[in-house]
Amino acid sequence: MQFVVIGKDKGQGELRLKARAAHLEHVSGHQQLIVYAGPLIEGGRMIGSVFIFDVEDRAALDRYLAGDPYFRDAIFETVEIYESRWMVPEREPGFLAAEAERARQTAG
């Protein structure tokens, strides 16, 4: 299952800076769970993070988050978690064409 996690920093990012080295070390040992991750940047300043995880289920995501210093040490003011589906790039050739056909049939 894929999950999108968006965290927006508390304050001016001072908590992020304190936890960043430990967070990066943690992430380096769990890269197989992460499709994409990086900072949210506004005006040249990091204001949060976005992660796209590919994990077995929500429980696996929660286990990961419990160990990541950014989440464990509560550097985020808000955290949004959404289940998603991998669409692009196609993992299987023809997937998007089949999905488009299903959408046509559903739309009537």
Image (cartoon, rainbow, N blue to C red):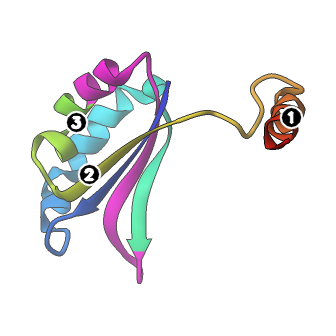
Residue depicted at x 47% and y 23%: 32
Residue depicted at x 59% and y 33%: 85
Q: Position of residue 44 (x, y in %)?
A: 41, 79
The label on residue 105 is 1
Choose mark 3 or mark 1, whichever is in front: 1
> Which secondary structure lies at badge 1?
helix
Considering only order in the chain, which callout, 2 or 3, is on the residue closer to the N terminus? 3
Residue depicted at x 30% and y 42%: 24
Q: Which residue lies furthest to the front in this view?
A: 108
Q: Residue furthest top?
A: 56
The label on residue 44 is none
Choose mark 2 or mark 1, whichever is in front: 1
Q: Give the range drawn in magenta.
A: 42-64
Distance from the alpha carbon under mark 3 to that under mark 1: 43 Å
Report the residue marked by disc 3: 68
Distance from the alpha carbon under mark 2 to that under mark 1: 36 Å
The one nearer the camera, 11 or 94, is 94
Whether label 3 touches label 1, CB < 8 Å: no
Report the residue marked by disc 2: 79
The local crowd at label 1, few if under 14, some if 14 to 19, many if 20 or more residues have their Cα within 10 Å, is few
Considering only order in the chain, which callout, 1 or 3, is on the residue closer to the N terminus? 3
Q: Position of residue 29 (x, y in %)?
A: 34, 26
